[in-house]
Image (tube, coloured by chain):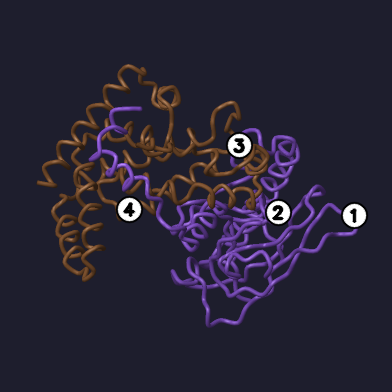
Chain colours: A brown, B purple
Amino acid sequence: MSSFPLQRPAQAAGLDSRTISRAKLGDIDAFTAIVEAYHARCVRFARAMLRNPDEAEDMVQETFVRLYRALPRYEERQRFESWLFQILGNCCRTANTAFQRQSSRTTHDDEAVERMASSDDPAAQFDHEWSEAVRRALAEVPEYNREIFLLHYVEGFSYEEVERMTGVKQSALKMRVKRASDQLRTRLSEERR
Amino acid sequence: MTDAERDPVLRRALEELRRVPPPDVEAMRRVVAAAAAARVTPFDAEPGILSPRRGRSIRLWVVVGVAAASAFVGFALRGAWTARTRVTPTFASSETVADSTNPTLRQVVGSEPDAPPIPKQFVFNSSQAHRVSVVGDFNSWNPANAPMSRSPDGELWSVTIPIAPGRHMYAFMVDDSLFTLDPGAPNARDPDLGTKGSIVIVGRP
């Protein structure tokens, strides 16, 4: 069995420290390079984190705006993508709280059903159904476990890095990831029956 | 190998979750534009980035403050003398705002696209910049639309551009990358972006 290739964010981004230093000084071209390197990954994370995935793009934009404003205060001994995902996580949590207050998830489930019904290609529909099943199962994982799970297993941050980002001890992080994994596995196994 | 890697269900779920969405160039463009507009320097206390220019900005603010106070006193005295309702400019500008009796909200707050444009001079003080442009809602925030010329002594940058009467938001783009507010003008939050821009009110001749 081949093992999971955990995507290392820095390698995936291909950014050097000079680009980040230039962005710190306000170089918009350097900042554009940062956006190009991380935008898609941030959208992926936001879609998985948010109760309303349609807000993902807005949250990513909000994150980059905050990041650009705060760049002069960025300390280069801190890992850049850890810092970026910390800001993104904060934005997503705030958005989830606001969304919880004003809406229920019924609308989105209805939309998902409509989208599933509209596909004619059986293979595409199967993929789509699986994708929706994963999304639904993940949405049931408590936010505080979900975020850690995504940071570790999807974004590839080590437990040590996640500990620095969240302030939660590694033993507790591992427990949360295990709970999230168990919940996801159970829910998806039920879906497949 | 972790538990997740051993479990086929979780493995498939992670493959799904790791799928990176295709790059959205338009969305990235919007992100960069919003971020560029949000970066307020050097007079909005972003520590560390432009601290060497602080000394100059303080002197400028003193000059602007004295000028604004003089203008206010002058207008107040003139207003009392003529006993008429007027629009009083609250910014330091090289352009003279003409009198306007009974100004409507549109005249004070919004621009008037149908009215003939009025030449407005913008001045920016920097000996260190290599390129400066005016960007604003009157030129689609495009630095290429209003590049400024440097004075022979290399201290001042200026450009005069025709602008429709009304209230406009603008800033200076320094060296194509630094979005900088005008130290000689009031600023306000952009209602669309929630970020700051300088304000100019262009009057009628």
How far is the residue under mark 2 from the one under mark 1?
18 Å
Q: Nearer the viewer, mark 2 or mark 1?
A: 2
Which labelled disc corresponds to residue B174? 2
> Looking at the picture, how far across and down is residue B56, in whole percent?
75, 40
In this rendered view, identify the residue nearer to me: A67 or B53: A67
* A123 vs A181: above or below: below
Chain ID, mark 3:
A
Please name the residue shown 41% across and 40% down the image: A88
Which residue is the extreme one toward the right? Answer: B152
Q: Which residue is mark 1?
A: B153
Q: Which three-letter amino acid code belongs to the residue tagged 3? A: Pro
Which labelled disc corresponds to residue A72? 3
- Among the two numbered marks 2 and 1 on one chain, the one whose residue lies closer to the N terminus: 1
Q: Which three-letter amino acid code belongs to the residue tagged 2? A: Val
How far is the residue under mark 4 from the one under mark 1?
51 Å
How far is the residue under mark 3 from the one under mark 4?
27 Å
Q: Which residue is mark 4?
A: A55
> Looking at the picture, how far across and down is residue A11, in whole percent?
55, 40
Chain ID, mark 1:
B
Have a look at marks 4 and 1 and say if they share a chain.
no
